Amino acid sequence: MSIDVNNESGTEVDEQAILDIARYALARMRIHPLSELSVIVVDADAMEQLHIQWMDLTGPTDVMSFPMDELRPPAKDDAEPPQGLLGDIVLCPEVAERQGKEAPTQHSMDEELQLLTVHGVLHLLGYDHEEPDEKTEMFGLQAAIVDGWRAEKGVTGPSPAPTVS
């Protein structure tokens, strides 16, 4: 898996954890190991500009996903997953920090960025949360991936609750 993490935000973030959880999520979703992903960490001003440009919404958001090859997880366990360029995930640590503090299970900015990374990966793979049944599926899968990664890393304590809008 080729995953690039580029921190342009000026905020210190745990880039290794972002890389690790992205790799874990893609493996868990059975995405081809030669697929490519880019994660960009930006400040609130840059995120707001992207939010305006692509969503026509003001203010910075937590995560945005820009799919490229529209890869999807294989339908059957024995199917060979397609290889390609997944796309870009853009994260904003300033929003992540605020959301982590406001979450029911308060958690750190880095824990929120890990959750947002998984959220972004799922969006790149075609998952959405516009409809209630889609939200249930996506957020359930997101929690399972975050919990699985945390268990594999030996992290104890409550997992971050979904705070993604």
Image (cartoon, grey):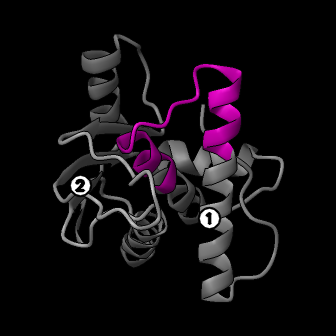
Cα gap from disc 1 to disc 2, whole angstroms: 24 Å
Q: Report crowding for label 1: few under 14, some 14 to 19, many 20 or more residues within 10 A (C-alpha).
A: many
Taking the spot 27% from the left edge, 27% from the top edge, the residue there is 50
Name the outermost residue toward the bottom: 154
Q: Earlier in the sequence, mark 1 or mark 2?
A: 2
Asked whether the viewer can see residue 42, the reply is: no
Mark 1: amino acid: Val
Q: Report crowding for label 2: few under 14, some 14 to 19, many 20 or more residues within 10 A (C-alpha).
A: few
Helix, strand or loop at label 2? It is loop
Instruction: Say which of 93 and 3 sits in front.
Output: 3
Disc 1 to disc 2: CB gap under 8 Å: no
- Find residue 163 and report its horizontal and vertical position in percent: 67, 41
Mark 2: amino acid: Glu
Quarter holding the N terminus is bottom left
Magenta-drawn segment: 118-139
Helix, strand or loop at label 1? It is helix
Name the outermost residue toward the top: 56
**In the image, is residue 134 part of the stretch drawn in magenta?**
yes
Q: Would you name the residue on which mark 2 appears?
A: 8
Q: Would you name the residue on which mark 1 appears?
A: 146
Instruction: Say which of 41 and 71 sits in front.
Output: 71
The quadrant holding residue 30 is bottom left
The quadrant holding residue 129 is top right
- Look at discs 1 and 2 and give the one toward the viewer: 1
Vertical comparison of 90 with 148: above or below:
above
Taking the spot 71% from the left edge, 61% from the top edge, the residue there is 107
Quarter holding the C terminus is top right
- Find residue 4 and report its horizontal and vertical position in percent: 21, 66
In the image: residue 126, left or right of residue 136? left
- Find residue 83 and report its horizontal and vertical position in percent: 18, 59
Q: Secondary structure of the magenta portion, mostly?
A: helix
